Amino acid sequence: MAYKFRSLISNKIIQALEHASQGRKGVNSSTLIPCIQVEQRSNILPEFRVSLKRLQQRGILTSSAVSRENLLKCASSLVEKFDTDMTIPGVYVIADKADIRINFKVNSDQLVADVIDITTLKPDSFWRSSAYIDHLPYERVVADYSSPNIAKPFHVGHLRSTIIGNFICNLHAAFGHQVTRINYLGDWGTQFGILKYGFDAHNMTEKDLEEDAMKKLYEVYVWASQKAEEDPSIHIQAQEIFSKMEQGDEDTLKIWDLFRRVSIKDLSRTYGCLNVMFDEFHGESMYPASKCQEVVDMMEAKGILHTLDDGRKIFEMNPKQRVTVVKSDGSSIYLSRDIAGAIDRQNKYEFTRSYYVVDSSQTDHFLALFSIVHQLGFDWAVNMRHIKFGRIQGMSTRKGTAVFLRDLIDEAQAVMKKKQEETDTTRASLHLSGHETAERVAVSSILIGDMKQRRQRDYDFSWDKALQSRGDTGVKMQYVHCRLMNLQKNCGVEYTQKANTRYLTEMAAINLVREIARFDEVLVETYNELEPCILVNYLFKLCGVINAAIKQLQVKSSTLELAKARLALFVSARVTLAAGMRILGVEPLNDM
Ligand code: ARG
């Protein structure tokens, strides 16, 4: 929203750089604008700032300005050559130990009016009024996320992948890119042999899988793999069953199809609770041995596949690291299927970006995948990226450590209820109206609890922390959103877009505008790093500033014009908070 200002400042900086002969040739506003940030100090009128270190890192300054002394000189000559006017009336240098910055004072009335106008006019897309975001190159994105294995448990890794992958897709969609959301099921492999063995041994039928399919299949799988461990002949049987599947045996594929269908049905319910959706359910089964053979042929033609004495075919990442691409019995494996899948996705979607949202333990797998695709001569290999994340400890339910999402949500609700009973007399207690609200607050707290950390960090999950209404939690975000909703409903003033925002002069109001104005800047940063925590932490900060403003800026008891202006500000804050929450995959509540 503050784009207009950043763009003006950027043009003037470019001119000043030229006059002072300090800038590199070809510097344009698209490289400069991301370096111009809203000043965050809360005791000053709106200002923007640019860090000279950052300009230097981005190659915007000429290389002579390397030392601190030079940077200081450069800053003063820039300030000297900078053209101030009504919109940007002041400019000055701030030098501290860490950095040298130039600050730009901006016309407060203009900024306040602009920010409120733009956000409230297009609550679902206001950030795209920032020409910077709109001018980013158009991308066709495919994202592979969640991707659980049928028969094996949906573990916390899959939960994180679901949450982070969904966020990444929402974010790209918010930037106007084309996004295809793929759930790549682990629906192929010897484990199906094991599963079928267990299913048959229990005389089970389709009827038995009508409810809780994933859980039941998992139980059968656990039982059968234990048996297979005791009795190796079962393992051989399982391998034979899988071989039949690879050869296209109809009877075996029928039962496999049943497992797949009921699992998708069951999973879809879970995804519904999480507010997560997919465009396509793909699976490893799309790339059976016959499809992988094409990959093998290509690799052999390029001379990058070596056959070992035992019949295995391997790819050499480097002299020390070899990876198997084909097993000695000729069957396909996870890696060969992923190679075939990557090529297939490029053919189908002509992606300009392909993301795999999978925990860090698979780093080597993806390095091998990308390296093979590259060596096969596909230039687009550089557009594939492994979005890694760390492990969570402690996210178990009373029922055990395998995470079934339903259990998790139930657990969150149970803990919340307990908290509610304990704190019923305090102000911050949760008064959740109805089951659905409780479920949505529970889901919000799981989502935010997960995304508030840097994604690659391992972390300890605590129900207690995730569900606090006062700390930095999803509960708090929902709570603040509801507070703004209530304020709008009960303040006695009709909201109008034409409020006179010149009435907003208090520091609390300016601070809130400043925070709202940072939204597009924060989105770009989140986007560049694909780090949800950047957006989450910004929203927490926004919530804090909103709470402070609500306390200080009465709407109800103010004169009509002032009340209208304040209400417009709060509406602007609410749509900004809601937009951020939605990108994170959290549907804002109006009442709780
Ligand atoms: N099913 C795999 C697992 O649970 C994750 C699949 C990720 N996607 C991929 N294309 N390899 O470990």
Image: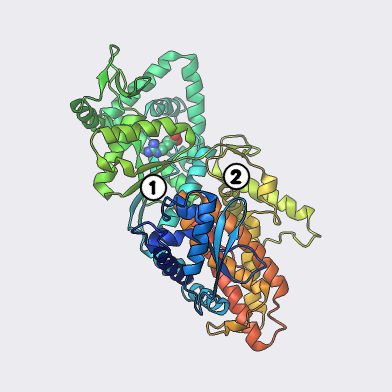
User: Count the marks: how many?
Assistant: 2
Q: CA distance from mark 2 to mark 1?
A: 25 Å
Up-down relation of residue 591 to residue 85 (above or below)? above
Which numbered circle lies on residue 408? Answer: 2
Depth check: give the residue in front, 285 or 23: 23
How far across and how far down the image is residue 370, in percent? 33, 35
Image point (70%, 67%), residue name: 548
Depth check: give the residue in front, 395 or 349: 349
Mark found first going from the N terminus, 2 or 1: 1
Which numbered circle lies on residue 534? Answer: none
Foreground disc of the pair 2, 1: 1
Would you name the residue on which mark 1 appears? Answer: 143
Up-down relation of residue 474 to residue 401 (above or below)? below
Q: Quadrant of residue 426?
A: bottom right
Query: Is residue 69 visible in this depiction of the protein?
Result: yes
Left or right placement of residue 212 versus residue 178 in this view: right
